[in-house]
Image (cartoon, rainbow, N blue to C red):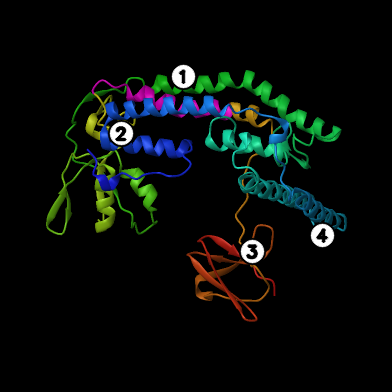
Amino acid sequence: MAERANLVFHNKVIDGTAIKRLISRLIDHFGMAYTSHILDQVKTLGFQQATATSISLGIDDLLTIPSKGWLVQDAEQQSLILEKHHHYGNVHAVEKLRQSIEIWYATSEYLRQEMNPNFRMTDPFNPVHMMSFSGARGNASQVHQLVGMRGLMSDPQGQMIDLPIQSNLREGLSLTEYIISCYGARKGVVDTAVRTSDAGYLTRRLVEVVQHIVVRRTDCGTIRGISVSPRNKSRMMSERIFIQTLIGRVLADDIYIGSRCVAFRNQDLGIGLVNRFITFGTQSISIRTPFTCRSTSWICRLCYGRSPTHGDLVELGEAVGIIAGQSIGEPGTQLTLRTFHTGGVFTGGTAEHVRAPYNGKIKFNEDLVHPTRTRHGHPAFLCYIDLSVIIESEDIIHSVTIPPKSFLFSSK
């Protein structure tokens, strides 16, 4: 049973992610039987609240973002300047397309970030906000198309169309915007019919290859293991990845802190033990994995580790090969259907920018940076480790920490 200190009263909004964490913690502390009883009560409470609230959806619930007007205006001005540069031959056509996409994608992303605070300040009990951000129905991308802007679209070949859809579905689309958005919508419907079979075929081939791998013994007797250390010389492993790597694995060697043995060989690792390793700063931990299993056509319980289903060591006779094949194949089907759900709206990422809040002199350690040029020919400094940059302007001093592998731009 859990100690009372470990149990926390959550007096806040519990969304889908928080519920997952809570269930995982309950299983760790109390086991499956007690957790299933609690989840039954949570389910009943959910049905009661949903019935009492009686959420409905009307067009007035789609609250548009007030800052959208000037944001779109600013992006249009930047696009116009870019068009002039291209007309005078200062910018190549490829570079113009890239910068245009970046301008509109940044505008669309800023509107997406404004969406949640706008709902919270205007009406925290807005049905659209409650449904999407709790994880019950829809997601942030779909709400963004309803109240923000549809943004950049893909054509049938998957290429970007540099003319963005500035309207949202609440305001209504113009004729040109409607024709552009039809590309993506139709492509989604066709892809669902055509490409689902390809994703299913991949799953079938994966399962055929590994279907014979079954847990047949408890211990294969291997003495080999893979060494895991958070302080590796070649690369630093973050604490979160270190914990994810170790939890559910089985130790290949005894672990000593000083002269005291804190964990034994063939002991499975839980969150408590991993946290103890982090606290005491254990140098290197040797764990058993399927790669180190001595068997060739099957696998043993200790090399496989814990089953995510129930949090204990995997059962004998478990068809782990088929589970692995299906686990890799299933996201393929989801990715095929994603275009259908987003309606052809371009989803991608842009590099994170940190802008100086005002003009001034910048100071940094020049030994930690290397002068270089970006792939577009802009002069910059490349920093290899965390770099502290100080910006001085009259009587104001501002400090910024730049992460490794970042470019530092300064205008003289």
x and y, in percent, of residue 40 in the image: 37, 25
**Of the pair 81 and 202, the residue shown nearer to us:** 81
Q: Marks 3 and 2, how far apart in space?
A: 45 Å
Is 133 displayed left or right of 288 in the figure? right
Q: Which residue bears the numbered disc 4?
A: 90
Q: Which residue bears the numbered disc 2?
A: 27
Which residue does the image show at 69% across and 58% down from the upper left? 376
Q: Give the label, 3 or 4, closer to the camera.
A: 3
Please tell me whether mark 3 sits on a helix, a strand or a loop: loop
Residue 9 to residue 181: above or below = below
Dominant secondary structure of the magenta stretch?
helix
x and y, in percent, of residue 95 in the image: 74, 52
What's the amino acid at mark 1?
Arg
Q: Which mark is residue 336?
A: none
Please tell me whether mark 1 sits on a helix, a strand or a loop: helix
What's the amino acid at mark 4?
Asn
Q: Residues within 10 Å of mark 2 (few under 14, many from 20)?
A: some
Q: Which residue bears the numbered disc 3?
A: 355
Residue 308 visible in the current orientation: yes
- Quarter of the figure with the C terminus: bottom right
Which residue does the image show at 25% across and 31% down from the upper left? 313
